[in-house]
Image (spheres, grey):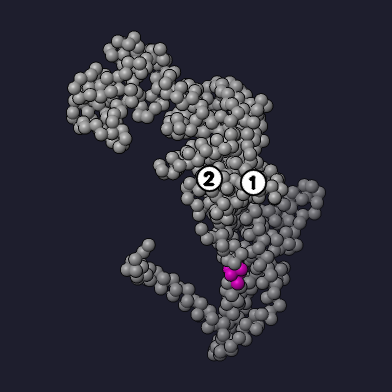
Amino acid sequence: MATQHSRAAARLMISPAVILLLLWMIVPLTLTLYFSTLRYNLLMPGANPFVGFENYSYFFTDPAFTTALLNTLLLVGGVLVITVCGGIALALLLDQEMWGQGIVRLLVIAPFFVMPTVSALVWKNMFMDPVNGLFGYLARAFGAQPFEWLTAAPLLSIIFIVSWQWLPFATLILLTAIQSLSSEQLEAAEMDGARFGSKFLWIILPHLARAITVVILIQTIFLLSIFAEILVTTGGGPGVASTNLTYLVYIQSLLQFDVGLGSAGGVVAIILANIVAIFLMRMIGKNLDA
Amino acid sequence: MGTITLDKVTKSFGAVQVIPPLDLTIGDGEFVVFVGPSGCGKSTLLRLIAGLEDVTSGEIRIDGRNATETPPAKRGLAMVFQSYALYPHMSVRKNIAFPLRMAGMDKAEQDRRIEAAAKVLNLSDYLDRRPGQLSGGQRQRVAIGRAIVREPAAFLFDEPLSNLDAALRVNMRLEISELHNTLETTMIYVTHDQVEAMTMADKIVVLRAGNIEQVGSPLELYRNPRNVFVAGFIGSPKMNLIDGAEAAKHDAKTIGVRPEHMSISTTDGQWRGVVGVSEHLGSDTFLHVHDTGLADTLTVRCDGEIGVHHGDAVYLTPQPDKIHRFDEAGLRL
């Protein structure tokens, strides 16, 4: 138990860091909020009059907005489902004793170290391309028509690419969690008559609950702002079929040079992220309580 | 019923044979304690019986049926682990119910058995708590509860008391003995603590390096240890072992005298020595006597109020009929 004195000292000593962090966050946020209320287009220099919520109403009534919102949620949800399920499966496999364990683990973790743009381009040109890609080659080998991944199923393709990148992260965290499960507990369950399915459901999965929560929360933060993969593969298209909110903000502020509208989009993205965060904490946050 | 027979059972990990061929019969309702120094293979032996390790060769029979290849859950045995191995995310009730639920037992019967077990183990007030909220002794009882409800043919205990403090250990020792009297089920108990072995067992199996050194009731082992190892291991404080000329007088390579079988005097006696450390227990005092010329230290048990001090000269006299004699190979003569 800390005494009153040591608590006060502790507050004093962490205050520089806290204040710095606060400024780091508050200044850009305030600027974004401020810009979002101006008519501010770089192609039309001159006065930037205050227009209230005009930018927001433009943003919300943009025909691409609903699609982008839905795409964002689908992208986050899809990648989470694939990485968590795949991560648990891979972690269970990697936990087994096997020959070449070190190399295999290294290989599994490798995708995480590849830059998003690079891995997206590799997928785009070497796997999903209907002419040069491996999938197209395989399809032709079986006499089928190559599937045009990026045009026929753009969002799904991006979900696959991003999942491939994030699977190692989930696997790594879940593997360490599985390794911390005491073998006596599993043996006790075995003596109690639990087969593999029941052992997994009643012993391993509850043990992993906290790690899964961490994986979901951390990944959500990064997945809400997926951008590079979309830019280098589909460019948000065809049409807006693979545009998420981040990409929509990019289109509006940088392609159309509209700072005001882009800022409004940014604020909407922040609000969406917070809504998602609140829902997540409600649903799974209790797992983090010791 | 719970008769367990081991027939020429061996176990090797790679090239290392930890259990050489071993035969053992455990009768129905017996309380058998496997005791030995750490690394003697006693836990491995228990795990072989439980089915958590595969035997390398030989046969394990439970109630006459060959169970060598039977998976652990089908052997009808229940095990209590050293770390208790409770499921931390389940309440006490669910922990105890787990084996029943795995067996697909109906809810009413489950509840009946849980209530009965909780009553026997004084856990009724804690059924809705999580293991993390319980003390060490209570967790131990939950682990036992989870074993009891299955109504197994035999209980296996793997050093269950080693994580408890001294006072609680004495208590749980009594509770487990009491439980054995109530249930009259076969119990196999692994420990490195010879006091636990002596106080609880109907039958003690002394192991060294995977070999059975001796099997017998506690007093049998105390009175007639088969070799020097058992003589030194059973009994507290340890038996004094004396080599050389004094042993030769008794036609033996080694003789052994227990601390409680020597009398002490400050004036005269057979062996002279100098008092070193004295351990006062109140009822008894254990004196460590040096410079006798027989062994490094002789331990002797004497009256709690004995008035000798560090550095005093004393004389020890062994009771002639309580001298154990061992030959070159360490076997009893």
Residue occupying the point 68% across, 65% down: A74
- The quarter of the rendered structure image containing the N terminus of chain A is bottom left
Residue occupying the point 30% across, 37% down: B282
- Please tell me how crowded label 2 is: few (under 14), some (14-19), or many (20+) other residues with Cα within 10 Å: many
User: Would you identify the image quadrant in which residue B233 lies?
Assistant: top left
Mark 1 or mark 2, whichever is nearer to me: 1
Residue B112: give x, y in percent of width and height: 66, 48
Circle number at residue A212:
none
**Front residue of B281 and B329:** B281
Confirm whether residue B9 shows in the render: no
> Which type of secondary structure does the marked residue at label 2 adopt?
helix
Residue occupying the point 56% across, 89% down: A50
**Does A4 sit left or right of A245 as displayed?**
left
| Residue B20, above or below B153 | above
The residue type indicated by label 1 comes to Arg
- Please tell me how crowded label 1 is: few (under 14), some (14-19), or many (20+) other residues with Cα within 10 Å: some
For mark 1, name the chain.
B
Circle number at residue B113:
1
The residue type indicated by label 2 comes to Arg
Predominant SS of the magenta segment: helix
| Residue B105, above or below B5 | below
Tag 2 residue: B141
Residue A159: give x, y in percent of width and height: 66, 60
**Front residue of B181 and A150:** B181
Confirm whether residue A130 shows in the render: yes
Residue A238: give x, y in percent of width and height: 72, 68
Q: Tell me which segment is drawn in magenta.
A: A275-279
Q: Give me the C-alpha separation between circle 1 and circle 2.
A: 15 Å
Residue B154: give x, y in percent of width and height: 60, 34
Q: Are marks 1 and 2 on the same chain?
A: yes
User: Would you identify the image quadrant in which residue B170 lies?
Assistant: top left
> Which type of secondary structure does the marked residue at label 1 adopt?
helix
